[in-house]
Amino acid sequence: MMNDNKNINGTDISQQIKNDVKLDVEKLISQGITPKLTVVIVGENPASLTYVASKERQAKEIGMNSNVIRLPEESSQKELLGIIEELNNDSTVHGILVQLPVPKQINEEVVINAISPDKDVDGLHPVNLGKLVLGEARLVSCTPAGVIEMLDREKIAIEGKNVVIIGRSNIVGKPLFHLFLKRNATVTVCHSKTKDLIGISKTADILVAAIGRTKMITKEYIKLGAVVIDVGINRVDGKLYGDVDYEDVLPFVSRITPVPRGVGPMTIAMLLKNTITAAKTQHNIK
Ligand code: NAD
């Protein structure tokens, strides 16, 4: 129990965000705008189906309009692009999300490029990524945005801190690098080819693991008193594990996100927040 207060509780924080977003939804509705999120899924990937159902349910819970367009596994890229085009042109739809991964006959990059940047609530369109690099992004990839939001809501300072991110994917590591840089952290990004990963990780005031390897980060990687953000979601025998060996590092960290109930719940909360941002942008509301 002693170490419980070290946990950064993503379930509670995501609920706070959703409460705030709900107020935004009510305000927009009073102005005649009902924010709407449309999720498109191709195929029957069980994890994706669960995520998509959760996104629709949580959007509805806070009063948004939300629907899921389900396409069969064998759908062509042309069919999917046709649907995206319709959604781009539908003024009642503010946020479009195509659940990834898509089946192999469909090129992910072409699909992402087809979504209107103003409706790209996943923040993956090159225009939004470019704005992120310039420090001007409005729609930012949900998981990285959620990491920063967690730190802010827990009043964990970022400015001037040494941040080490392990993982350089387009959906987590790279956007997070830019978000931390904008907040005046000194940021190092490590990856599978990094030499002396332990030595570099040990310099981190804030260590982010976004690797996809169960319990890889042990106490050897931790600077005493570091804040540890575990983005990893690894399913082993039906149970979820992070990239961090929680029990091993716990005595040495000041704060840590557990798995589950850490970064995970933040992603959908930020998706809903992005949908509000998208709705406001499309209606020229500040
Ligand atoms: P990815 O596979 O695209 O990228 C993994 C990164 O880790 C790569 O940049 C790779 O270079 C690096 N890496 C791999 N092995 C390494 C090693 N031994 N040493 C150092 N670096 C190494 O993964 P991703 O999509 O960024 O996801 C990472 C993890 O985060 C996964 O467990 C995923 O399930 C999870 N994730 C969680 C959420 C969420 O909501 N909460 C969202 C996205 C991803």
Image (cartoon, helix red, strand yellow):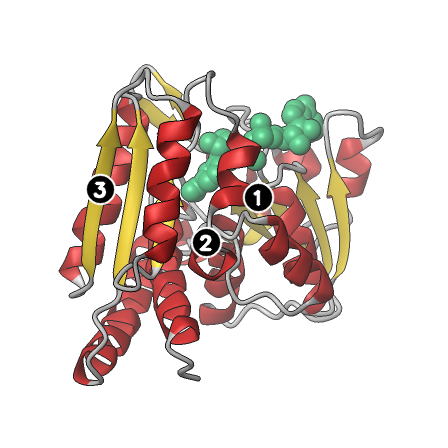
Work out whether mark 2 precedes mark 1 in sequence or the reverse, and give the earlier one.
2
Q: Amino acid at mark 1?
A: Val
Q: Which secondary structure lies at badge 2? A: loop
Residue type highlighted by circle 2:
Asp
Q: Which mark is residue 172?
A: 1
Q: Amino acid at mark 3?
A: Val
Quarter of the picture holding the C terminus: bottom left
Q: Name the mark on residue 120.
A: 2
Ligand 1 falls in quadrant: top right
Identify the mark nearer the N-term, 2 or 3. Answer: 3
Ligand 1 closer than 8 Å to label 1 CB:
yes
Q: For the residue carrying disc 2, how many other residues have a C-alpha within 10 Å: few (<14), some (14-19), or many (20+)?
A: many
In screen coordinates, is 59 left or right of 48?
A: left
Give percent across and percent down for residue 269: 34, 57
Q: Which secondary structure lies at badge 1?
A: loop
Query: Marks 2 and 1: which is nearer the front?
Result: 2
